[in-house]
Image: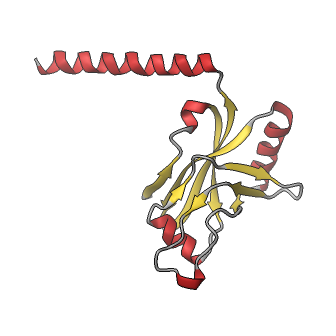
Amino acid sequence: MSIKVLARNRKAFHEYEVMETFEAGLVLQGTEVKSVRAGKIHLADGWVDITPRGEAFLMQVTIDPYFQGNIYNHKDNQPRKLLLNKKELIVIESHVATRGNSIIPLQVYLKKSLVKIEIALVRGKKLYDKRLATKKKDTQRDLEREHKVKVTV
């Protein structure tokens, strides 16, 4: 199965603690698909909203207009429907309602010829958690650098 990542939310792992991830289909119009395939999608400020009818919508995700779209171009910042199983929607809705978690997009990718999005149930990190994560990252980078120097010498 070939997967080509089109966009990642790099801010997500710094700002949030990821609890569980889900794969969802994304309902797009014609020029939106072409623009997404060109990598013109921005996930940084996006989030997922569950309606009372039990539907999931992707909010505040910007898909730039397709440069050859003319009058058929789409609005760049409109809600887009997510395609999830009923069981997944129930699990997500219960986590958001009872535990106060949020749902954010992590990455958009092509799976075969379909545009898919990976969303995650997340909990916000505190400032000290962020400091601890950056400290771990720095020490890991230093250890890898020392190991690389020892191996090549």
User: Is 4 left or right of 48, judged from the image as shown?
Assistant: left
138 to 2, vertically: above or below: above
Name the residue rendered at 81%, 45% in the picture.
Answer: 93
Residue lying at the far right of the rendered structure: 52
Residue 29 appears at what percent x and percent y? 62, 74
In the rendered view of the protein, which quadrant contains the N terminus? bottom left
- Image mark count: 0
Res. 84 in view: no
Residue 57 vertical position relative to residue 32 in the rendered view, above or below: above
Q: Position of residue 17 (x, y in %)?
A: 62, 30
* Residue placed furthest toward the bottom: 71
Residue 67 visible at all: yes
Judging depth in this view, the residue of 120 and 40 nearest the camera is: 40
Snapshot quadrant of residue 122:
top right
Placement of 50 over or under 13, stated as above or below: below
x, y percent for residue 38: 44, 66
| Depth order, front residue of 53/36 | 36
Which quadrant does the C terminus fall into?
A: top left
The answer to whether residue 85 is left or right of residue 39 is: right
Residue 111 in percent (x, y) is at 50, 61
Side (left or right) of 110 relative to 90 = left
Q: Residue at x 48, y 21 (%)?
A: 134
Please tell me which residue is depicted at 40% across the width and 19% down the height of the picture: 138
- Residue at 43%, 57% in the rendered image: 4
**Colour scheme of the picture:** secondary structure
Dividing the picture into quarters, in which one does residue 100 lie? top right
Q: Nearer the viewer, residue 119 or 47?
A: 47
